[in-house]
Amino acid sequence: MSADPSAAVVALLSTAPSRDVADRIAGPLVEERLAACVNVIEGVTSIYRWQGAIAREAEVLMVIKSTLTRIEELRERLVELHPYEVPEVLVLDVRDGHVPYLDWVRAEVGGA
């Protein structure tokens, strides 16, 4: 693990209404080096309360790998690209992992 805590690797979770929308969000995040990788996972069903009613929607999950160094820029850009009024943005600390992969994430987003 890097000694610099700001270079810590994080995983950000967000959902999108379709594969096309997820691809339109993921592309710029990687191209702009805000994310090293975005996994787009289809087949997610979300059940939630929104504006007083229970909703059940098919969604696509994005698992976005980045660093703590880039998280604020990543969050802002994700919200800017996202069609939802209130997009899901959950940042999870990566406590451990395969060191070469973590180093690759850091190198791709400039957080090493």
Image: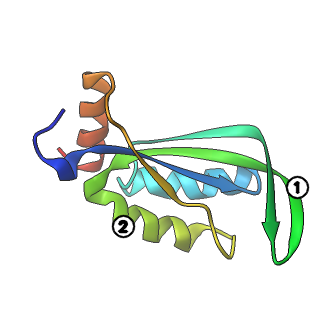
Q: Assign a secondary structure to mark 2.
A: helix
Image height of 26 relative to 100, above or below? below
Asked which colour scheme the image uses, the reply is rainbow
- Residue 60 screen position, x and y as percent: 72, 47
Image height of 33 relative to 103, above or below? below
Residue pictured at 49% horizontal, 58% vertical:
28
Label 1 and label 2: CA atoms lie apart by 30 Å
- Residue 80 screen position, x and y as percent: 54, 73
- Residue 98 screen position, x and y as percent: 31, 21
Q: Which residue is mark 1?
A: 56
* Left or right, 43 with reference to 71: right
The disc placed on residue 73 is: 2
Viewer-closest of 105 and 10: 10
Residue pictured at 82% horizontal, 78% vertical:
51
* Left or right, 100 with reference to 82: left
Q: Assign a secondary structure to mark 1.
A: strand
Check whether the beta carbons of the residues at disc 1 and disc 2 lie within 8 A of each other: no
- Classify residue 102 by image quadrant: top left
Image quarter of the N terminus = top left
The disc placed on residue 42 is: none
